[in-house]
Amino acid sequence: MSYQKRTKDQLAARVARDIHDGAYVNLGIGMPTLVANHLPAGTEVVLHSENGILGMGPAPAEGAEDYDLINAGKQPVTLLPGGAFFHHADSFAMMRGGHLDICVLGAFQVSATGDLANWHTGEKDAIPAVGGAMDLALGAKQTWVMMDLLTKKGESKVVAQCGYPLTGIACVKRIYTDLATLACTPQGLRLIDTVDGLAHDALERLIGLPIAR
């Protein structure tokens, strides 16, 4: 049976569906920022950015960008009524103090038990430093990862043990990918859902690890 990968927007919508009403959420650089455009209408989710914003809205319409109002990835954002911006030291205090319910981060690799590797050095397109990811991964009440399951070479980013420098140990609770949603537990991976048509044993072959149901 054939299957089709989730598009980036479909993946963002899948993540947004699991964010509870009233949550304080940080969306990491890259793909996670798309989640802001898919939050369900009628839910109150307060978006935080590590450069010092609380109460971000969706991306601005084309032509309405204000480049004095940007997120941590230097993308223009909007500010909802009641939103605020402040010194980044205060922002990091929020992150480190356990005041965020969820952070959604990208990753190069995630281990079956939730170790996170989302930065590395040595390549021209490498992220040059870990930034605030360590503070987010360990400070948020839940850390979720949003990424493609496979690299461009077809290798699984979900691994038994990370080969890149670690951002955090056993910090990731859920992995949202273009093919499946997985939970990380001390015992290993547990399946939450897959795209239509992707069999459980086929997913295990792609990842190369057992996945509990």
Image: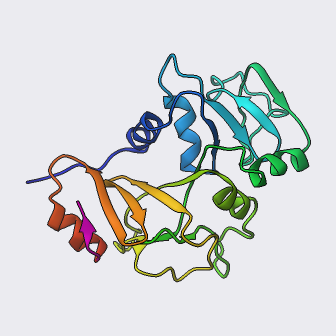
- Colour mapping: rainbow
Task: Describe residue 138's horizontal placement relative to residue 172 as left or right.
Answer: right
Q: Is residue 140 magenta?
A: no
Point 88% across, 45% down: residue? 90
As displayed, is residue 96 above or below residue 100?
Answer: below
Residue 137's quadrant in the figure?
A: bottom right
Of residue 36 and residue 168, the one placed in the foreground of this image is 168
Res. 86 image quadrant: top right
Above or below residue 50? Residue 67 is above
- Find residue 60 and report its horizontal and vertical position in percent: 66, 25
| Spot occupied by residue 16 in the image (x, y as percentages of width and height) | 47, 36
Percent coordinates x, y for residue 189 in the rendering: 34, 67
Q: Which residues are magenta?
A: 209-213
Numbered circles on residues, count: 0
On the rendered image, what quadrant is the C terminus found in?
bottom left
Residue 18 rendering spot, x and y as whole percentages: 44, 38
Residue lying at the far left in this picture: please name it.
Answer: 1
Q: Residue at x 84, y 50 (%)?
A: 93
Q: Quadrant of the N terminus?
A: bottom left
Our reading of the magenta stretch's main secondary structure is loop
Instruction: Identify which residue is drawn at 25% across, 65% down.
Output: 212
Using residue 139 as the reference point, say whether residue 208 is left or right of it.
Answer: left
Which residue is rendered at x = 80% and y = 34% of the image? 67
Say above or below: 140 vs 75.
below
Considering depth in this image, is 100 or 127 the residue closer to the camera?
A: 100
